[in-house]
Image (cartoon, helix red, strand yellow):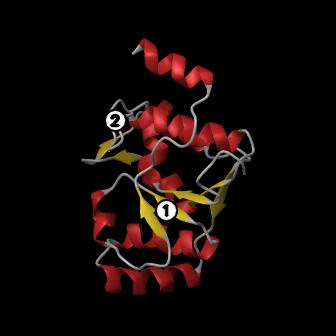
Amino acid sequence: MANSDYTKPYVDSSVVIAYVKGEIVLAADGHTRVDIAEQLFSRAQDGQYFIYTSALTISEVHKVKGGTELADAEDESIIEFLRNSFIKIINNDRGIGEQANRLSRKTGLMPNDAIHLASALYAGCDVLLVWDKRFEKVKHAGISIEQPRMMGQLKLMEVEKKQKK
């Protein structure tokens, strides 16, 4: 787990979509979402940590913000991507559903967002990574909730890629 501030990150569907669609949207730290997501998933693939997400993500990624549906090929690439061994899927059961119900009432989160939070807590994750402003109002949830960001020292390839932009 060296060279990483994350030890057990949970990602919601916004992070997966940014990665697969190659979102060029600038994040708070000045890097593009796709670059941040690429680093996050690359480090997981290199064995620095596993990435956790809910089974709900498999369904949720079908539509992006604003309700736009992904093309079939994009959808299939996300489903295939989520089969990687460095991604751990949290199955939603009654316990997570009941916890999400309570969290939704307590925090004001939408039910699907509360399922993500309940799933991250169930898995014992250290951080819930999300590009969704609705999570900003959640305080004292028992987990750090933050936007993904570039971590540690960049690999040489990442530096060269950034310099070409």
Residue drawn at (39%, 34%) of the image: 31
How many labels were placed on the picture?
Answer: 2
Identity of the amino acid at label 1? Answer: Leu
Nearest the eye: 100 or 58: 100
Camera-nearest residue between 112 and 146: 146
Q: Position of residue 138 (x, y in %)?
A: 34, 73
On screen, 50 above or below 160? Answer: below
Amino acid tagged 2 = Gly
- What is the crowding at mark 1: few (fewer than 14 residues within 10 Å), some, or many (at least 20)? many
Judged from the image, the secondary structure of the residue bearing numbered disc 1 is strand
Q: Nearer the viewer, mark 1 or mark 2?
A: 2
Instruction: Indicate the quadrant where residue 155 lies.
Output: top right
Describe the element under mark 2 as helix, strand or loop: loop
Q: Which mark is residue 30?
A: 2
- Tell me the residue at 62%/68% (across/down): 91
- The disc placed on residue 128 is 1
Q: Residue 33 location in percent, x, y?
A: 40, 37
Regarding residue 75, the answer to whether it shows in the image is no
Q: Residue furthest front?
A: 153
Can residue 88 be seen? yes
Q: Residue at x 41, y 49 (%)?
A: 14
x and y percent of residue 6 in the render? 59, 55
Q: Earlier in the sequence, mark 1 or mark 2?
A: 2
Q: Quadrant of residue 96?
A: bottom right
Residues 84 and 7: in front is 7
